[in-house]
Image: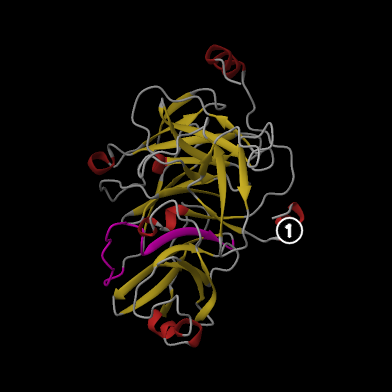
Amino acid sequence: MAAAAMAAAEWFILYAIPKVAAQEDDSIFEQPTNMSFTFRKAPCPSYVTVASNVVSPDGIIHYPYIAADDGRGIFLLCGYTVLGLTYYLFDPWRRRTLGVIPRVGGLRLRDVAGLIRSGGGDRLMVAELNTWLLDDRGSVTIHCTVDMYGWDEKKCKCSGITAKRPWNGDGVLSHQGFLWWFDLSYCILACDPFAPVPEFYQIMFPSVPDALPFGWNRDIHRCLKVSDGQLRYVQIHGASEKPVVSIWTLSSSDPSKATWGSPTSLPLDVVWEDSSYSDDARLRPGVVPALPLVHPMNANEVYFFLDTCIFAIDLTKKKVVCCEEFGIGWLPPKIRTSRLVHAWQWPRPRPVKVTKMSPQSAKRKKKHGAT
């Protein structure tokens, strides 16, 4: 897709698992870049190709993964190298990756790593949530980068965490100056990681009496996304032969004040009976689809996976408004869930400042030979 078309397009569905190709392939990479974008109009997925000297493509588990974005176009890429799980920032304008100095010691997990930009907009931070003591003491800490050239562990204020359970992270969102870690079977844990002592707020997910079983993936029938400037939680629930899709909106982007509003719900069998669904041979009435996405500017438009298709239902019109073949086949369809797609808007042209380097960080950079 040409640059003019990209600028005109409202948004893209970005597949979270990049392709990997040889750096020498000049049909993909223009020098001196080491990544490229392939843009397709939603609902077809767009995707990133990354050079093989950055990350390894191997494995059904240890694959490269776009874990998060800063809300302004910069992405956090988790890739596997000889050092294990490694973090990279990548900038869609420069089409270059920047490696983040690895944290020494401890286990690194891609589902607990978030990316956030400071209020002034000139600093980026990678933050990892540590939940080892959550189910026992109700406390967490975070490891966060210092100017991308070092790491610090921050003790946190956790008095707001009252419901204690083991944590099974499903992802993290950057929204309105906070990182929002979430376990879709449990709760949201939100904080401002730039604060000297971050304070965590716990927001339990809405409970329904007729939840569908988790199955192979915890997030196959539920997702948390940002739409129209607010956090939205969507869940398919009810009997499998007569499921209902419901969407809840968080009342505030300040987690200290946030509560869930009343849901908007639609029985899926109403849509199954509509000609927009029943007349499309690719869609099978009576089969519960997976739930990956909400339109980033229209919360009434919810996206679903079914077999090899991605389609959207307008909850107010009660009909299918678009349907396409997903068209990306380097991972099995059964693991295509909400964590594998991002609703992404192409950022406006701007100079990108990745760090504001302190003297201490400059010393770390020189010591580690970072470029």
Where is residue 226 drawn, in percent x and y? Answer: 53, 58
Quarter of the picture containing the C terminus is top right
Total labels: the figure holds: 1
Q: Quadrant of residue 46?
A: bottom right
Q: Give the color scheme: rainbow, by chain, secondary structure or one colour.
A: secondary structure
Locate residue 113 relative to residue 21 in the image: left or right.
left
Q: Residue 350 colored magenta?
A: no
Query: Magenta segment: does it hold 221?
Result: yes
Dominant SS of magenta comes to loop
Q: Amino acid at mark 1?
A: Ala
Which residue is pictured at 56% across the width and 43% down the height? 49
Magenta residues (range): 208-228
Question: Residue 333's image quarter?
Answer: bottom left
In which quadrant of the rendered image does the N terminus lie? bottom right
In the foreground, 227 or 19: 19
Regarding mark 1 in the picture, which secondary structure is present there?
Answer: helix
Q: Is residue 336 left or right of residue 12?
A: left
- Crowd band around label 1 with a 10 angstrom C-alpha radius: few (<14), some (14–19), many (20+): few
Residue 99 at what x, y percent from top left? 54, 29
| Residue 176 seen from this side | no
* Residue 357 position in % (x across, y down): 63, 23
Circle 1 sits on which residue? 5
